[in-house]
Structure formats: C-alpha cells, structure tokens
Amino acid sequence: MKLAILGSGFIARFYADALVAQRRKDVITMVYSRTEANAKKFADDYRVPNYSISIKECVEHKDVDAVIIALSNDMHLESVLACASVGKHVLCTKPLGRNAKEALQMLQAVDKANITGGYLEDLCYSPKFLKSLASIKNGSIGEVIWAKSRETHPGPHSDWFWDKEKSGGGAMVDLGCHCIEISRNFIGKNNKPIEVMCWADTRVHPIDAEDNAIGLVKYENGAIGQFEVSWSFRGGMDLRDEVMGTEGTIWTNNFLRTGFEMFTSGKGGSYVAEKAESTTGWLFPVGDEVHELGYSHMFTNMFEAIENKVQPSENFYDGYIVNAIIDACYVSAKTKKWEPVIIEDWRGVAEKKETKKMNSYDEDHFLIKEEVLPSGEKKFIIKNKKTGSIEVR
C-alpha cells in the first residue's frame, strides 16, 4: 500500500519508524509539512520520494492509496475532509477531534465516501493490552466490573498541545482519550457509556487548559471506567492499567517499569525513551519502543482492514465515542456533578444480560466468602436466604 503522511514531527516519525522497521509491502510515498524545510528533511530521513506543503496536493497524488494524519488536533477535520473528497482511505492519530462535533463530522464524511477511517489509538494495540483483552474475552477474569487506566508524564513535546484552541483541551483530551478507549475495550464496546464524574485542574503550568484530571465513566451494565492523567508527573511516562473482574484481576505496567533498568553516569547521553527526563542515574529504557507502544500491531490491523474491506479494531466510530465521553467530562469538571454522555449516533449492539447467580453454601444460605485462617481452619461467611442475616460457619 502506498502511503502519505501528513505531518513531519514527533508522532509522524514514530509512525514512520513503525512502517519502515520491517521489510514490508507498505511504503511511504509522500509527506506533507507546513514548512518545506521540514518536509524535505523528513523525506530525506525516510527516503520518501515526494513531499509537499499542500495537503490537497498530498492526498490527491497518484501514488497515494491511503493517508496517515499526524498533525495537530485543529487540523484533523480539514485533513479528513480532504481525504474523503477524493476517496482516499484515512488513518487519523488520536484524539479524532477536538470535540464530539468535529469527530462526528469526520465519521459521517468517511461513511459517505465509503472509505476506511482508522483511529490510530496505539495503546489499544500494545502486546500487553492485546494479551489482556484476549484473556478477558476468554472469560479468564469473569465479568469486568471496574477498569482503570493511567497515563502521566511531564508534559507534551510540541507547543500546540499547550494551546487550548488548537488542542481542544489539556491533559484530558491528550491522555484521557487513551485511557477511556482502553477501558471501553476491557468493559466491552457494546456497553453504552451513560454518565461521567470528573475532576480537572490546572495545578502546575501557566496554561488555560487542565494539566491534571481524574474521571469516572459509568456504563449501562454498571461497570466503571476510571482514568488518571497528568502533565506534571515527574520521572518519565507512566502507563498502567488495572482490570477487576468477578473471577480475577489484571495489572499491567506498560512503560515506566518494564523489567529493563540501567545505571549510567551520562557519558553517552543517548535517547532513553519517550518523555524520559534524564540521561543519568538509574534509567528505565524500553526494549522496542515502537513495538511495545503498539504501533506495529496497529498499522498491520489498519492495512489488513483496508485490504479486506472491513472495519479496523479502532475506527472513526470509536474516536467519536471517546470524544463524546471527553466532552461530558469537561462539563462535569465545571459542574462538579455526574453529567450524561451525549451520543448522537449510538451503534452498539446491546448484549443480553444474564441473570446473576449467587453462590449457595447450602439450601438455606448464600456463600459470601470462604477463607482459610492462619490456624488452617476454614471459615465461611454466609447469608440466610430467608432472613438476610449474615452468619459465620
């Protein structure tokens, strides 16, 4: 597949590294940047034959089959509409829009053009995430009742992130989009998000947007998704997920402490990992950053979906739902109340709820808990089915 990348900065280079890391049939044939010098440098670095400072020229190029958007949030809508107008498949970095209104416009545009709209949510393709999701779908931890995702780091790399008008918000729209979609997958995408409760504040940086936030997302099946995000966490980038089910629990540490530790005096001063704050002392490098952050699996899924004319695992509809949840979080952060999630185009298929079965201790009692005491004796906490009284056996 012949690809164009719109953007030549930090995330565009991550994408390009993922695309050229392996010998494969997908190649970058065109790159766009707002400045010719940056476009040319990117083209030289990745041996891209064509470059342009025109989005229109880039997406309309005869040697482009699909377009990857790696631009600031305020340019997503314009770029998607340009792709849809010429029928080019489009893959857009997260968040899809600055808000749900923009995201819905993009979703409707790709639907009308009958093209693939892939949502580049890399953390939903990391090896640990995919393994966790497979275990949940296989029933290993039972019904998921709570999912928590955390992403914190010292702040983004580009100036536009800090501009509320260009980004659409602060840490919540930048990092919360990851965390919300991770929890949606664990809880089940067919479960409709119905309301949110959120705290957000600007604690450290002189900006108009929030640099710290915590939120709860309640789903129609009663499950809770929780996110923690920060642009003022010191020590690198912390990516962690926790999932609690009726039959088990999953904990993952995706980035900061992954079992690779190194001490250095700093003589070499080389790159360590994304958002690392130091090149001296004890460091926590990442073995294969592109792979471990999910980029490799993500692009494979995207291109196979285009070839097979099916939706990728993460698509524009998912991006729209995430934006709708974030919009509600911003409202809640102001009102300090539970606020409804407004979804104009809900496509989830309601899953049939099974009647919950309580474990019985005997004919007259439910079993609440069974445990073994230090003495070796077994203890049973039970509930009388008729009277409701709690008893011990």
Image (cartoon, helix red, strand yellow):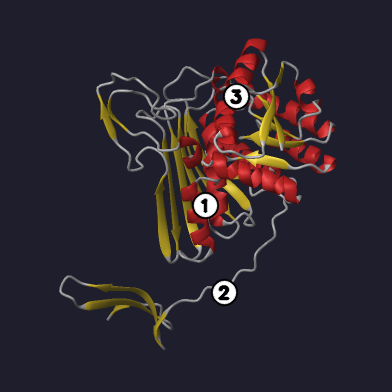
Q: Tell me if label 3 and label 2 are in contact, CB under 8 Å.
A: no
Q: Nearer the viewer, residue 91 or 308?
A: 308
Earlier sequence position, callout 1 versus callout 2: 1
Q: Quadrant of the N terminus?
A: top right
Q: Which residue in the rendered view is the most extreme toward the left?
A: 375
- Label 1: state its secondary structure: helix
Q: Gap between marks 3 and 2, in whole Å?
A: 56 Å
Q: Quadrant of residue 75?
A: top right
Res. 301 in view: yes
- Discs 1, 2 touching: Cβ within 8 Å: no
Q: Mark 3 or mark 1: which is in front?
A: 3
Residue at label 1? 130
98 lies left or right of 279: right
Q: Position of residue 189 (x, y in %)?
A: 62, 54
Q: Which mark is residue 46?
A: 3
With respect to residue 189, does 343 lie above or below? Answer: above
The spot of residue 27 in percent (x, y) is 67, 33
Q: Is residue 142 left or right of residue 115?
A: left
Sequence-earlier tag: 3 or 1: 3
Q: Amino acid at mark 2?
A: Thr
Asked whether the beta carbons under mark 3 and mark 1 sit within 8 Å of each other, the answer is: no
Per the image, label 3 sits on a secondary structure element best described as: loop
Amino acid at dot 3:
Tyr
Q: Residue 167 placed where, x, y %?
A: 61, 25
Residue wearing tag 2 = 355
**Observer-nearest residue: 285 or 208?**
285
- Marks 1, 2: nearer the viewer: 1
